[in-house]
Amino acid sequence: IPKGADKQMSIPKVNLQLATPMVRVNLQKAYAVLSQFDTTNLKEQLLAYPERIREQKLVVSQRRQALKDAELAVKEIEAALIVEIASEVNENNKPKYSNVEIRNAELFARKKTSPEYTFAEADRRKAEAELEEAQAELERLQDKFKAYRYIVRLTAEELAAINNLSENE
């Protein structure tokens, strides 16, 4: 939406000096009603939210990629530990960790003592939390946009009802 588009949508001001007295009174009443309903602000908010949502979707996408990168770093370190464990041999030149359960237990123990793994896992958790935070903000913006749409619709219906009442007078 181009800048200034919200200004184009507002009620045009009329030179009241050129209007007949009856038109002038009705226009003044209309401007007073519109002012009470804060229609200019509602339109500005309604027009601003799609851009805010688009920007937040970009943040979510970036955070999702950061999480994938962090998960990959954790998996790479874990793979290196697995290779290290699988390649170790005892004094008889036989695998030191001969069965799956023992290898898994050793992997678990090494993960706990590996500073690289600990840091990578902390980065992964941080990236996951940041993604959840960005997603929650996106949902908040989308909910607020929906709420503004309902408010604008309700305001339009109220203004139409006021108009119908004034026409029936």
Image (spheres, rainbow, N blue to C red):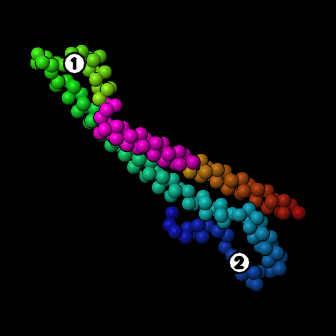
Element on which disc 2 rests: loop
Whether residue 55 appears in magenta in the rendering, the answer is no
Q: What residue type is labelled 2?
A: Val
Quarter of the image with the C terminus is bottom right
Taking the image as shown, residue 74 lies to the left or right of residue 86, namely right
> Looking at the image, is 110 positioned above or below residue 58?
above
**Relative to 53, residue 124 above or below:** above
Q: Which mark is residue 83?
A: none
Relative placement, left or right, of 38 versus 67 is right
Q: Quadrant of residue 165?
A: bottom right
Query: For the magenta stretch, what is the residue range?
Result: 111-140
Residue placed under numbered mark 2 in the picture: 14
Residue 117: x and y in percent read 31, 36
Query: Can you tell which quarter of the image residue 47 is in?
Result: bottom right
Which of 12 and 155 lies nearest the eye of the viewer?
A: 155
From the viewer's perspective, is residue 55 above or below residue 84? below
Question: Can I make out residue 4 in this image?
Answer: yes
Q: Which residue is drawn at 67% across and 70% down?
A: 11
Say if residue 71 shows up in the picture: no
Extreme residue toward the bottom, this view: 17
Sequence-first tag of 2 and 1: 2
**Residue at left offset 52%, top offset 48%:** 138
Within 10 Å of disc 2 (Cα), the crowding (few <14, some 14-19, many 20+) is few
Q: How crowded is mark 1: few (under 14 residues within 10 Å), some or many (20 or more)?
A: some
Residue 91's spot in the image, x, y percent? 12, 18
User: Which percent across, then down, holds residue 55?
Assistant: 47, 55
Q: Secondary structure beneath disc 1?
A: loop
Picture disc at residue 97: 1
Q: Where is residue 32 in the image (x, y as percent from the top left)?
A: 78, 69
Between the residue at mark 2 and the residue at mark 1, the CA separation in whole angstroms equals 88 Å
